[in-house]
Structures are given as structure tokens and as C-alpha cells.
């Protein structure tokens, strides 16, 4: 008999309703099976561009990438390129990366720092706010043409919780009207104090939603990422849906999956996680099911010693992954030590390709006994001081992405899924309750495409 056991999976049944860890009320998104054309049809892609990408608030940059006036970062979205730049007064503005004169792209690199932008074609110059400060040989232009000083076309931009959002709509609703997560949720992690220590952009042969779907559930872990079963409980994940397409899964870490019959015996992965917080596994007398709590206690003690302020986190937050979906194209894995900011970026022309843009953010801590968790997958020589912002690495499809075992497994899987979705023999996805975030996400996509939003 059917029973929605997933709704009873929760991290802390005692959590009060105002607690950020509290289970959210269920949102019924129906049982629609969507036409799989949404994953490959160029017409669907074109509607997504017109009605979704150019109308939703999108995470375009992190604030710590542009700390000083004149610091800029470029956000590439489909065929568009947007400059995000810190102003003299500390605010952030966004503008199209297009010279008003003949359309040349002004900025070619990913990031930099200037006091004004100079176009490489005929040397027109623009201030940080996008206004034209110099037209070369201005006296050779009929004054009629340049009397309203041309400017870089502005883009709506808001900063929130250390993130910079843009919206290409000419008259968008305020970000807070469309941002479904409760106040304090992101702020608690202090992303404004985290720094990007690794940034990789990989082209994958799949639709961007094929990827969102895969990253929005833990249902595939046992099959695709079996090694996670020793340290992640994919059967105890708390799934929550928020207004406007947002959602999350709270994934217990440092605990075995309930799919394993033996919950007591230790395994090398759990032992390794203990060593990272300076617990000697050979001295540990508890069972495997007590490791998560032991690690939480060790992290609290470490926070007290180093003044990391972990009082603001629940016990669960100290170990678990708060994988949080920000509609439409972001999942951010939140942890006290850092965050994975994953953006699923549409390809400019091909609905069966997308760019997986992943930034590893770290909260720098200067202490010899402190290290970021190994499962963050940072290469050994990574500078985690926050003082060096690494260049973005671009990896074309076919090259090994080298993103760590789990992500490499996903990158091999997704093109195969995409090929299957493309088949005449596929009738549309059948989602179970472990996949309720997918239903919530696609329903919101449809609201935009159907003109309800
Ligand atoms: S196109 Fe930029 S100055 Fe001519
Ligand atoms: Fe995966």
C-alpha cells in the first residue's frame, strides 16, 4: 500500500516552527507527467529565454569577488554578457557588456578592477556607473546624435546575503517578492565572509534541467555514487518546498545510509571524517551511528576555541548538507566551513548542452588544527586563505572535469540520461516523493512559460 514515508523524514522532529531546520508544510504539486520535449526542443528553449531567463532574478556574482570600488565580474547568460561592478559608494551596479557606440563587448576577461571602462574599438570611455565619460573626437559627431550622452545599458541588480542578483526584465518585481527562502536562512551562513577558492565551468551534453533534476534528489546515490552510502543517509533526507520554486534537501552526513543493515560497524570513511575534527578513531568507543554527534560536538568545541560563532548553527547544520535550490538555476550546498555554489547555465544555442558553473566558497580560518572538510574535494595545494581569487577554469566537454569522484560520476551519467530522454520511447518522467523537488521546480518553470508570472 502507498504511504508517503518521505514526508516523515526529518532532521529534528523537535524543531520549533520558527526554527530554520523545521519541516515545512507540504506543497501539493499534482501528478503531472511533463512532455520530455522540455529537455531538448529548441522552441521550448526559446520560450525559456523569453519568459524565464530574461525575467527571473539570477545569481550573477558573489560580493567577495568585488570588494573594492572598480572591481568587476562578468556574468555570461546565454548570448548575453553582463558586467557587475562595485561603485564608489559601495553599492553594486550591473550593465550590459556592450559599447553604446558600435556594440563591441567592452570587457573580455572574467574579473578585474578599473576606474573606468575603455572600449578597445574606438576608445570611448565609461564610468563605473556606465555613463559615458569620453567620446573620442566628439566634435566629429553631429551633436544631435550624442546629445543624450550614451551609456552602457543598465540591468536591474540587487545584493542579498553576500550574493549579487540581476534581472534582465525592464520592470522586475523586487527580489524579496520572488525569493522564497525565509529571512535569515542564507544570512546565517555568512556568505559575505566566504571566498571563492575554486571556480570551474564545464560544458556538459545535457539540458540544464536534466542536471537540476539530478542534483535535486538523493534517490540516485545508491546506484551512481555507492561510496556515499558509508557517510550519507539518503533515506533520512528532509525535503522542503518553498514558495516561488525554491526548495531544499537536508542531507545527514557522517552517518551511514539506512539502506545498510549494519548501522553499528565503523567504516574507513567515517573514521576519516573523525580525524578531520581531531578525533582519534582508535580511541572512539561509540558505534557508527554515534559518529555524527561526536563530530558535531568536536566542531562546537573547535568553534569555541577559535571563535567561529557556531552558536548560530543547529547541531545538524554542523555536519549535514543543506542543499538549497534557489529558483531557477542554482543549488547551493551550505556548510559552516564553506559552500558549493552551483549554477546550471543555459547554452546560448543548443538545448542539449549546458554549463555547469561551480564555485567552492570557503570561510578562511587561520589555525594549524583547522582544515576544510576533505569531501569538499579541493586539490591539496588550494589556497584557502581567501587572499587569492583563482582564475575560472574552463573545461570543454569530453575532457575529464576532475571535479571529484561524485561530480565526475554525474558528468558521465547526464549525457546518457539526455540521450534516453531524447528517445521516442520515453514518455516523460515519473517522479516519486524523493523527487518532489523536481515536480516543484518544473511546475514553477511552467508558471513562467505559461505567462502566469
Ligand atoms: S564600439 Fe566601442 S568605441 Fe566604438
Ligand atoms: Fe549525482
Image (cartoon, rainbow, N blue to C red):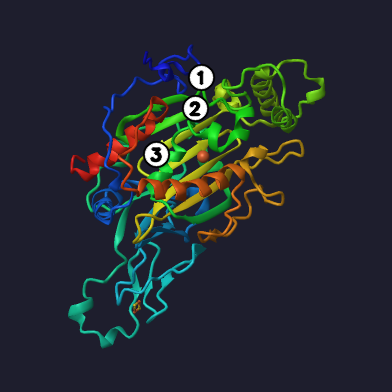
Q: Find out whether the residues at labels 1 and 2 contact each other: C-beta distance under 8 Å.
A: yes
Drawn side of residue 102 relative to residue 189, left or right:
left
403 or 56, nearer to the observer: 403
Foreground label between 3 and 2: 2
Residue 37 image position (x, y, % from top left) = 28, 48
Q: Residue furthest right?
A: 282
Q: Residue at x 42, y 51 (%)?
A: 206
Label 3 environment density (alpha carbons within 10 Å; few <14, some 14–19, many ≥20): many
Residue 60 image position (x, y, % from top left) = 41, 51
Q: Name the mark on residue 115.
A: none
Residue 304 image position (x, y, % from top left) = 68, 25
* Residue 231 seen: no
Does the beta carbon at disc 3 come under 8 Å from ligand 2?
A: no
In which quadrant will I find the C terminus?
top left
Residue 94 image position (x, y, % from top left) = 36, 57
Compare marks 1 and 3 and give the one earlier in the sequence. 1
258 versus 430 height, above or below = above
Query: Alpha-carbon distance for marks 3 and 2?
Result: 14 Å
Q: Find out whether the residues at labels 3 and 2 contact each other: C-beta distance under 8 Å.
A: no
Q: Residue at x 71, y 19 (%)?
A: 265
Drawn side of residue 199 relative to residue 115, left or right:
right
Q: Name the mark on residue 326.
A: 3
61 or 132, nearer to the observer: 61
Drawn side of residue 377 relative to residue 76, left or right:
right
Q: Name the mark on residue 250.
A: 2
Q: Residue at x 58, y 42 (%)?
A: 406
176 or 42, nearer to the observer: 42
User: Pointer 1: what residue?
Assistant: 11
Compare marks 3 and 2 and give the one earlier in the sequence. 2
User: Which element type, helix, strand or loop, lies under badge 3?
Assistant: strand
Amino acid at each position: 500500500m502507498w504511504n508517503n514515508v518521505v514526508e516523515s523524514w526529518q532532521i529534528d522532529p523537535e524543531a520549533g516552527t520558527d526554527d530554520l531546520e523545521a519541516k515545512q508544510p507540504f506543497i501539493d504539486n499534482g501528478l503531472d507527467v511533463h512532455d520530455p520535449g522540455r529537455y531538448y526542443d529548441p522552441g521550448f528553449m526559446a520560450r525559456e529565454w523569453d519568459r524565464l531567463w530574461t525575467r527571473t532574478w539570477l545569481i550573477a556574482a558573489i560580493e567577495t569577488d568585488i570588494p573594492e570600488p572598480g572591481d568587476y565580474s562578468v556574468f555570461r547568460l546565454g548570448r548575453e554578457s553582463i558586467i557587475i561592478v562595485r561603485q564608489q559608494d559601495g553599492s553594486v551596479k550591473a550593465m550590459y557588456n556592450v559599447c553604446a557606440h558600435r556594440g563591441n563587448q567592452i570587457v573580455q576577461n572574467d574579473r578585474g578592477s578599473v576606474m573606468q571602462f575603455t572600449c578597445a574599438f574606438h576608445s570611448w570611455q565609461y564610468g563605473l556607473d556606465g555613463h559615458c565619460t569620453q567620446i573620442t573626437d566628439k566634435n566629429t559627431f553631429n551633436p544631435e546624435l550624442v546629445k543624450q550622452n550614451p551609456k552602457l545599458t543598465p540591468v536591474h541588480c540587487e545584493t542579498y546575503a553576500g550574493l549579487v542578483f540581476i534581472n534582465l526584465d525592464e520592470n522586475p518585481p523586487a527580489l524579496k517578492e520572488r525569493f522564497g527562502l525565509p529571512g535569515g536562512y542564507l544570512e546565517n551562513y555568512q556568505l559575505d565572509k566566504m571566498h571563492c577558492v575554486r571556480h570551474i565551468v564545464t560544458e556538459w551534453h545535457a539540458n540544464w534541467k536534466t542536471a537540476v533534476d539530478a542534483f535535486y534528489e538523493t534517490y540516485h546515490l545508491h546506484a551512481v555514487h555507492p561510496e556515499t552510502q558509508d557517510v550519507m543517509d539518503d533515506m533520512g533526507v528532509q525535503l522542503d518546498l518553498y514558495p516561488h520554486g525554491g526548495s531544499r534537501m537536508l542531507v545527514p552526513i557522517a552517518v551511514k545510509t539506512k539502506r545498510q543493515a549494519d548501522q553499528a560497524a565503523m567504516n574507513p570513511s567515517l573514521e576519516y571524517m573523525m580525524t578531520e575534527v581531531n578525533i582519534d578513531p582508535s580511541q572512539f568507543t561509540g558505534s557508527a551511528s554515534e559518529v555524527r554527534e561526536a563530530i558535531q560536538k568536536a566542531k562546537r568545541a573547535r568553534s569555541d576555541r577559535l571563535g567561529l560563532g557556531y552558536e548560530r548553527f543547529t547541531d545538524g547544520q554542523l555536519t549535514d548538507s543543506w542543499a538549497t535550490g534557489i529558483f531557477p538555476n542554482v543549488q547551493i550546498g551550505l556548510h559552516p566551513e564553506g559552500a558549493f555554489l552551483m549554477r546550471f547555465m543555459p547554452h546560448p544555442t543548443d538545448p542539449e548542452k549546458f554549463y555547469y558553473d561551480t564555485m567552492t566558497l570557503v570561510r578562511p580560518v587561520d589555525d594549524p588544527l583547522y582544515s576544510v572538510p576533505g569531501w569538499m574535494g579541493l586539490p591539496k595545494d588550494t589556497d584557502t586563505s581567501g587572499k587569492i581569487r583563482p582564475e575560472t577554469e574552463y573545461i570543454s566537454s569530453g575532457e575529464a572535469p576532475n571535479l571529484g569522484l561524485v561530480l565526475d560520476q554525474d558528468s558521465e551519467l547526464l549525457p546518457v540520461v539526455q540521450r534516453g530522454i531524447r528517445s521516442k520511447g520515453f514518455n516523460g518522467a515519473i517522479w516519486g516523493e524523493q523527487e518532489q523537488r523536481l515536480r516543484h521546480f518544473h511546475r514553477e518553470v511552467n508558471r513562467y512559460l505559461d505567462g502566469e508570472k
